Image: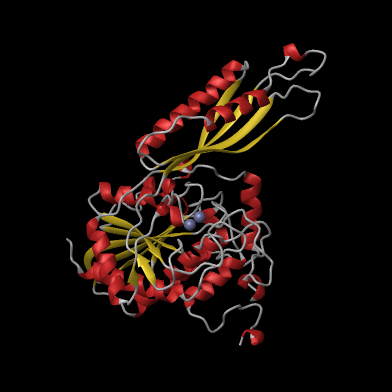
Amino acid sequence: MHDERDPQDPAPQAGTAVRWRRDLHRRPEVGFTEFRTASRVAGALADLGWEIRTGTDALSPGDRLGVPSDEELTAAYRRAAASGADERFLPAMKGGNTAVVATWRAQAPGPAVGLRADLDALPIAESGDPGHRPAREGFRSLHEGVMHACGHDGHVGMAVELAERLVADPPPTGSVTLLLQPAEEGGRGARAMVPAGVADDLDLLIAPHLGLNLPTGTLAPSLDGLLANSKLRAVFHGVASHASLAPHEGRSALLGAAAATLAVHGMPRFPGHETRVAVGRISGGTSSNIVPDRAEMLLETRADEGAVNEELEARVRAALHGAAATYGLTVDVDLIGGVTTARADRAAVELVEAAARAEGLRLVTARAEDGVASDDATAFMRRVQQRGGVASYIGIGSALAAPHHTPSFDLDEAALPLGVALLEGLVRRALAARRH
Ligand SMILES: [Zn+2]
Ligand SMILES: [Zn+2]
């Protein structure tokens, strides 16, 4: 069958979730550049009769972190416009306002159920090895250096198929809201959607994630232990001088960054808590005979409790400023991403468990360290919980060809129809529960 496949339609016989997954897999877009992905989803859901909020109605632009440069945004926008973006929704997304909130309402009022799906891909070059199925079957990334290596293409595919099923057989009461968020990777998108009020009136929020080292056919009804994190960019400013004739007149920004790197990695830890610190990139200087006047660092902290992460971040900031002072520099430190922790509510977990049993899925326990270490769905979960609703982050089993965030990552697509069935069963149960 595979040999007869039209290369323009990599899975003509497959269900909606798999077809969408393969289309998005071929055209991955990184955080805040999901112009094609977001506009097409908005278009598909609008055509099904769902209410759509997008652009600045779905997100507060000033609350985004780590937004790409204007040049990157413009290039991605043009590429999307030339490759099948939905023109009805694309213009509102200009500048990287790529969130979509889609709501379906039944005839009669009832519970408000929300589901999160994330739109973004990663800056990873996808494997071209024939052993890698997307390469072998013609849906490898067409965007060199960008890849859906976390399964978000599958999340969006499942959301669209779920939307179709609810419209085909509408539940009598309540509403369903799909929170299609940009820039999950790096913890940058959900935090900008929460201030737009998109999660305020939800009674239940479920954030599903595929993979997580769980076999196909299994389901983890909650995933605690997601780490809070803070992602920082530090820029040291010094004074350039001749490295041999006048080294005493220079102030080396690179020395400050180097000293800060050692200080950060030497931080004392917190007994009883999972913590991490990492300096992931350091760059600066121009030539061997010039004292470098600028150096940039990208670094992060993580912890299993928000307060511990805050303390760790404060100490890291102190180390950055201390290193700057030591070498006569100044330093600018910016938060470029960050997520908090959240815990599942018992009521939400019980609903998920009931739906999973009804669909014949095997319930398992998942730990954050098996797959995602952090996820900014926690921002939505916290908001819903603050307003009296309940939430859970769930793992939908899908055998993986390679770990998340690696060039040979691939989902088991057999998991997608199972995931759709689970989410459909869950939504129908929740809408019938009449919490209000
Ligand atoms: Zn990821
Ligand atoms: Zn992910």
Percent from the top left, x then y, of residue 121?
A: 56, 57
- Residue 203 vertical placement versus 131 (above, below): above
> Where, quadrant-wise, is the C terminus in this rendering?
bottom left
Query: Please, which colouring scheme is shown?
Result: secondary structure
Residue toward you, 168 or 263: 263
Residue at x 66% of width, y 61% of height: 143
On the image, the x and y values in percent for residue 400 come to 52, 67
Which residue lies most toward the front here? 271
**Residue located 50% across and 63% down the image:** 151
Residue 53 found in image quarter: bottom left
Above or below for 141 versus 390: below
Query: Looking at the rendering, which quadrant does residue 203 occupy?
Result: bottom left
Q: Residue at x 79, y 29 (%)?
A: 287
Q: Could you tell me if residue 417 is visible in this image?
A: yes
**Residue 133 percent coordinates (x, y):** 61, 72
Residue 94 lies left or right of residue 362; in this view the side is right
Q: Residue at x 49, y 27 (%)?
A: 317
* Image quarter (top left, top right, bottom left or bottom right) of the N terminus: bottom right
Q: In the picture, residue 354 is in which quadrant?
A: bottom left
Determine whether, in the image, residue 82 is placed left or right of residue 416: right
Q: Position of residue 278 (x, y in %)?
A: 54, 38
User: Looking at this view, is 37 or 276 the one in front?
Assistant: 276
Is residue 106 visible in this depiction of the protein? no
How many marks are shown on the rendered structure?
Answer: 0
